[in-house]
Amino acid sequence: MDNITVFGYPVIAYTPGDVNNDGVINVSDIVRIVNIILSTGNGPTEQELLAGDINGDGDLNVVDIVMIVILILNQGE
Ligand SMILES: [Ca+2]
Ligand SMILES: [Ca+2]
């Protein structure tokens, strides 16, 4: 088990679902996740992994895409 020491550990700021970290959750974030899953372009940063892994299972896949779509739909009300 890892030490629980947090001092000096870099804190990564992220918003769940806001994968590209532009302040809004929209189709651009979906596109980014799809690109990550398909391994096109640059690999995911730690921030992208944290923001994109909505269900927290440590992986980016279609489940996270579905959950972000739901987030997008719910924020438009
Ligand atoms: Ca975004
Ligand atoms: Ca996930």
Image: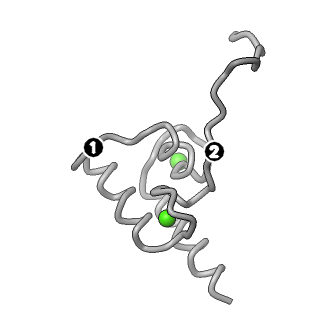
The residue at the far bottom in this view is 77
Q: Which residue is mark 2?
A: 13
Q: Would residue 23 appear left or right of 2 to someone viewing this image?
A: left
Above or below 62: residue 46: above
Of the residues under marks 2 and 1, which one precedes in the sequence? 2
Above or below 29: residue 55: above
Question: Where is the C terminus found, in terms of image quarters?
Answer: bottom right
Residue 50 is tagged as none
Question: Where is the N terminus found, in terms of image quarters?
Answer: top right
Among the 4 quarters of the image, the one containing residue 2: top right
For disc 2, does the CB lie below 8 Å from ligand 1? no
For disc 1, does the CB lie below 8 Å from ligand 1? no
Q: Which residue is mark 1?
A: 42
The residue positioned 66% from the left and 33% from the top of the image is 11
Q: Report the amino acid beneath label 1.
A: Asn
Graded by Cα atoms within 10 Å as few (under 14), some (14 to 19) or many (20 or more), the crowding at tag 1 reads few
Q: Report the amino acid beneath label 2.
A: Ala
Mark 2–mark 1 Cα distance, whole angstroms, equals: 20 Å
Above or below 21: residue 76: below
Graded by Cα atoms within 10 Å as few (under 14), some (14 to 19) or many (20 or more), the crowding at tag 2 reads few
Determine whether the residue tagged by mark 2 lies in a helix, strand or loop: loop
Q: Nearer the viewer, residue 32 or 64?
A: 32
Q: How is the image coloured?
A: one colour
The residue positioned 35% from the left and 65% from the top of the image is 31
